[in-house]
Amino acid sequence: MPRNRLIKAEELSRAVQLAARRGTDGVIVLVDADEDCAVELAEQIRLSIPGHLGSRTKVWIAVREVEAWFLAALPELSGRASVLPGRPPQADAETVAGAKGRIAQHRVDGRYSSAVDMVRLMAQLDIDAAKARSRSFRHLDAALASLLAG
């Protein structure tokens, strides 16, 4: 769901309820912070989640963009998922504005589309490298562990 719809209380509530009705044990709400404060945006979103689903729903905000994780693990993505080989580490990937554009610069075809490429890059993402270099990814990992632990 596009971010501009997801941060609207009624849209988020509907999406979380739909996911819960599908028989899931929990729901992760994942949103790019863009220029917003990640902490404030997370709280705004948490307040929009229906009370009976709150304990089964975790909110995670990517600092700036989810694509910052790809920048954080760029050396490990090199040569895979159409990322050019020999890519160097990206210093402080979460402070980069325009991470989508930066990812495109490191791809074989010079393009990046989140709708087309994100799943492929996510499947190749080195979890340990992303956790080591991305604070927001560490938070996501903790949210997932918490959700799975019940």
Image: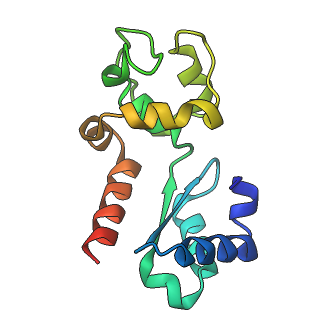
User: Measured along the vertical axis of the image, is residue 136 above or below residue 133?
Assistant: below
Q: Is residue 112 left or right of residue 146?
A: right
Colour scheme in use: rainbow
Q: Considering the image in quadrants, where does the N terminus appear? A: bottom right
State which quadrant residue 50 falls in: bottom right
User: Measured along the vertical axis of the image, is residue 107 above or below residue 128?
Assistant: above
Q: Position of residue 53 (x, y in %)?
A: 51, 84
State which quadrant residue 91 falls in: top left
Q: Position of residue 87 (x, y in %)?
A: 38, 13
User: Measured along the vertical axis of the image, is residue 5 above or below residue 120?
Assistant: below
36 or 19: which is nearer to us?
19
Q: Considering the image in quadrants, where does the C terminus appear? A: bottom left
Residue in the picture at 36% in, 64% down: 143
Q: How many marks?
A: 0
User: Measured along the vertical axis of the image, is residue 114 above or below residue 85?
Assistant: below
Q: Position of residue 52 (x, y in %)?
A: 52, 90
Residue in the picture at 63% in, 18% down: 111
Residue 98 seen anywhere in this rendered image of the structure = no
Q: Residue furthest front?
A: 22
29 or 36: which is nearer to us?
29
Q: Is residue 14 left or right of residue 46?
A: right
Q: Position of residue 28 (x, y in %)?
A: 47, 64
Residue in the picture at 38% in, 24% down: 74
Residue in the picture at 38% in, 56% down: 140
Residue 77 seen anywhere in this rendered image of the structure = yes
